[in-house]
Image (cartoon, grey):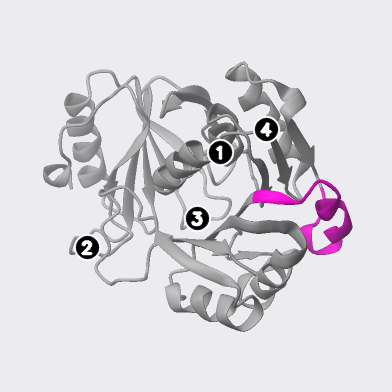
Amino acid sequence: MISHIEKIDATECQRIFHGRGHYYKDLSHVNVDWLPPVILITLYKEVDNDWLNEQATQLMQLIPECKSIQVQHRYKKLAPTEVLLGENINESIVEELGLKYKVSFGKAQNSGLFLDMKNGRKWVQSQSKNKNILNLFSYTCPFSLAAVSGGAAKVVNIDISKASLSKGRDNHRLNNHPLERVRFEGVDIFKSYGRIKKHGLYDLIISDPPTLQFGSVNIVRDYAKIVKRIPQWLKPNGQIMLCLNSPDLTEKFLFELVEEHCPECAFEEQITPPEVFKEAHQGKGLKVLIFRYQP
């Protein structure tokens, strides 16, 4: 695994090895993230301890700034995390594209920042000047941070998890952002269409739903409900970013949704993840499509 990792800029958080794309033979069960000063190895099946310890030792040598190497066992119940080498670090503040994010280790399955969406956040940052933006399924609000840093007039963050939104508010404070330009709505999107419409119309909508979230989201069943609302929420000539994380669905799923439920949306571009997110089969990884609403 270590032989596939190139020299990195250790000042910025990033994925440094992506095995889940099945690009590397016999390593599809391993991801490695650099969340300074922590290297987080995520395992999706059990591995030999000697192999794991050897990889950890080499990773520590590869990145001298590393103070802790931790491993998360996703194949185990509750995805426990343990420290392999170095310090027991539970939280850290990492940087990406000039913005700071608080991430955590061992407290939840996800650290608080999805690294494959870096290029999407960069695009939002470049497109947000003076715009009113709707951020659906906002999680800890990384897109909101990108939008405010890009000069957005207002960002409305919608997520069913109030705990995640609280972390998003903390992330904005961490970056000294003016909170009067940001709203946090801890509601079920599919039961709150009126509240969402109240803050519009929007110049840009970001939709980045989980593939399956028990009790709230089933992407195959529910994504059409978002696309159908575009005419009610989006200004003429406004843009919408449609994201899809399911490995079982390709870009075709999104194109067909738009064609059926909002054909007034014209496709503009696709945003690909950072180069490290190599995929053996096209369409398996993260999909991000930009459309413009032209009624």
Residue holding disc 1 = 128
Separation of marks 1 and 4 at Cα, in angstroms: 8 Å
**Amino acid tagged 2:** Tyr
- Judged by depth in the image, the label closer to the viewer, 4 or 2, is 4
The x, y position of residue 281, in whole percent, is 27, 72
The x, y position of residue 215, in whole percent, is 76, 65
Residue holding disc 2 = 23
The x, y position of residue 118, in whole percent, is 41, 42
Which residue is rendered at x = 51% and y = 69% of the image?
Answer: 266
Residue 152: quadrant of the picture? top right
Labels 3 & 4 near each other (Cβ < 8 A): no
- Of the image marks 1 and 4, the number of the one nearer the N terminus: 1
Residue 85: quadrant of the picture? top left
Labels 1 & 3 near each other (Cβ < 8 A): no
Labels 4 & 2 near each other (Cβ < 8 A): no
- Of the image marks 4 and 2, the number of the one nearer the N terminus: 2
Magenta span of residues: 187-203
Characterize the local packing of mark 4: few (<14), some (14-19) or many (20 or more) Cα atoms within 10 angstroms: some
Characterize the local packing of mark 1: few (<14), some (14-19) or many (20 or more) Cα atoms within 10 angstroms: many
Separation of marks 4 and 2 at Cα, in angstroms: 41 Å
Residue holding disc 4 = 153
- Of the image marks 1 and 3, the number of the one nearer the N terminus: 3
**Amino acid tagged 1:** Ser
**Amino acid tagged 4:** Ala
Residue holding disc 3 = 76
- Judged by depth in the image, the label closer to the viewer, 3 or 4, is 4
Mark 4 lies on a secondary structure that is: loop
**Amino acid tagged 3:** Lys
Mark 1 lies on a secondary structure that is: loop
Which residue is rendered at x = 56% and y = 38% of the image?
Answer: 128
Which residue is rendered at x = 64% and y = 44% of the image?
Answer: 139
Which residue is rendered at x = 24% and y = 68% of the image?
Answer: 280
